[in-house]
Image (cartoon, rainbow, N blue to C red):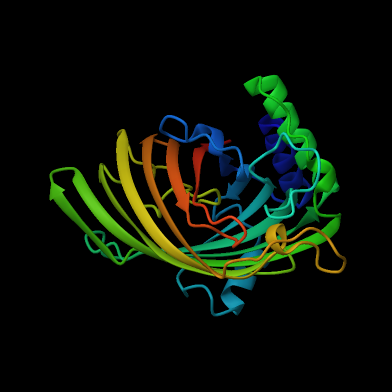
Amino acid sequence: MRPPILAAALAAAAVASGCGIQGARFALVEDNDVFNLGKGLNTDRDYTQGAVAALTLSDADTPAWAKDFAAAIPLYADDSRVHLALTLGQEMYTPTDIDVPTLIPDDRPYAGWLWAGIAIQGRAMDDDPDRRRDRMDLLELDIGVVGPASQAEQVQNRWHGEVLGVDEAQGWDNQIGNEIGGLLTWERRVRLLAGGVHNRLGWDAIPRFRARAGNVRVDATLGADVRIGWNLPRDFGPMAVDGTGLQEGTDPPEPWLALSGGAAMRAVAHDITLDGNTWKDSHSVDRIPWVPETSAAITLGWGAFSVSFAQNWNHSEFNERTRNHRWSRFLFSWAWYF
């Protein structure tokens, strides 16, 4: 799905759900290992491409049932400002040698994952603006499909042929089979530390925890990000589902810049893109249960608009071919009011 189609689909879904939108934040994410920084690092393998579009409603526009849900479960702080979000996304995974049309037994399977999701985000902001020990909680349910129905082959090869002008991947006939997928995600971020260096130069540290469960994935990630920036905004770093600035007058009034670095450890109990289909035989590899992750990012913003570029590094995810993987992310985000 292309970005304008994603945006239109999210807007239509919001209207259909009965949300009278007065203001919202739209985010568009593009992941690709072709964009890696450094000569010769565009790998075109493993997690090779992904896209997410998210529409996050303001607290005022979020329907009462979502706020009642957040108030009824202990995952959210009592004083959270609640935002409902709708998401659409697609991920694709390939082996190293995409010119081979036959199955490569000792490399990861071809796999695609296409989903639509609904998320409820709660943001509890510290009353003391100098301390800024803020908290963000997110609960998201994604429903979709893996396999040929995910359209990963069509999207990747169209991207390769029409946009990049390179050869198409030849092995998609060997991808894992069609399967309805479900994934429940809970994530928490806390601004544990924050301070100023000089005038408008500030910094903060944001530990994060994420747990995911479903037939697509079962894993947990513990990590932290450290940021330093000019006019550093009071947010939780670049995210697709983001309620930052969704009160008129709360966007940073001047341009801002943030540099960040992060590290995490992901514990993996199941990954359908490595383990293969749940209820039938398919290509699979020997998954590694512990995966270190690191990242570095730069984010620029002005008012309601921001753009971020991140370079990500993952340790090897399976035993047959122990290799690290790099991939990059562009995130565009903006808020508007009607």
Of the pair 263 and 45, the residue shown nearer to us:
45
Residue 196 x/y as whole percent: 17, 52
Residue drawn at point x = 68 percent, y = 27 percent: 160
Pick the quarter of the image with the C terminus. top right
The reply to whether residue 302 is visible in this rendering is no
Is residue 230 shown above or below 263? above
Residue drawn at point x = 36 percent, y = 39 percent: 298
In the rendered image, the residue lying farthest to the left is 198
Looking at the image, residue 266 sits to the left or right of residue 235; the answer is right
Is residue 61 shown above or below 69? above
Residue drawn at point x = 43 percent, y = 38 percent: 308
Of the pair 269 and 252, the residue shown nearer to us:
269
Is residue 77 shown above or below 12? below
Is residue 305 shown above or below 184? above
Residue 75 x/y as whole percent: 53, 75
Residue 305 x/y as whole percent: 45, 35
Pick the quarter of the image with the N terminus. top right
Residue 317 x/y as whole percent: 57, 60
